[in-house]
Image (spheres, rainbow, N blue to C red):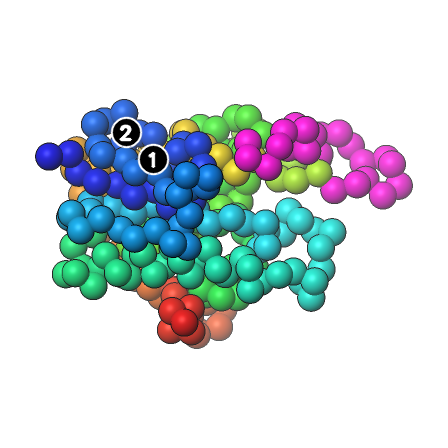
Amino acid sequence: MSKIILDLCGGSGSWSKPYLDAGYDVRVVTLPDNDVCTYQPPEEEIYGILAAPPCTKFSRACWQIPRSERDFVEGMRCVRACMNIIWKVQERGANLKFWALENPDGYLTRFLGYPVFSFQPWMYGETDFRATKRTMLWGYFKAPRKTVLKRTIPFVSPYSRPAGDGNQDDAFINRKWALVDAAERAKTSLHFARAFYLANSEESPVLGEESPAQNTKGICHTAPNTGSTQAGVPASARA
């Protein structure tokens, strides 16, 4: 029987595509066919869960919307639904080989605490407009090894902010980011997806070894320069 992967709020299924290509039973839970807020996970044993709740309410790329005007209640509705599914599956015996929740750099840290892993897609060989998208992961998983250690692409903004005086150098503006629609921007880099699969699959030679993400058990992370510890998923998110 094929191992089941749940891809919550998966959109096009780009994050889970390497699992699908490898023969896993990938179930993409995404609108319009499936609503993560009403979805009930199957009773069969599930191998892993990927979750990418909408980032609109949290992303700093939406710089024009002040924090005081963001609908965090609506934003957390999908985050909470994803976590409830993960918790429900884990309560059967904590048998998940991995689970990971993804969101771009933004205000979600104020709800879930510090992420256990962060990256930019260029670190995995991405060269298109997604290359500089700062992304954070919470969860219990093997950290995918970064394959590009020296940055060679320009230091451009992951979003396009108006130049102000009109004299901003084009090299510092990611113009294609503003030209594609939100669905295209939300897609996970296939370079990163492949690296994540290699670190978190039955075929992985490193599966079972400790990684930075699992050294923290995927639930806590020490805040830089403070010595304080933030819960990866607070109890209040379960409400």
Residue nearest the observer in this picture, 202 or 88? 88
Disc 1 + disc 2, Cβ < 8 Å: yes
- Answer with left or right where residue 98 lies relative to residue 175: left
Residue 205 appears in the rendering: no
The x, y position of residue 167, in whole percent, is 86, 35
The x, y position of residue 214, in whole percent, is 27, 56
For the C terminus, give its image quadrant. Answer: bottom left
What amino acid is at disc 1? Ser
The x, y position of residue 65, in whole percent, is 71, 55
Q: Is residue 227 above or below residue 213?
A: below
Q: Which residue matches tag 1?
A: 16
| Few, some or many residues within 10 Å of mark 1 (<14, 14–19, 20+) | many
Find the distance from the CA under tag 1 to the CA under tag 2.
6 Å
- Answer with left or right where residue 94 lies relative to residue 168: left
Decide whether residue 44 is among the magenta residues: no
The numbered mark at residue 20 is 2
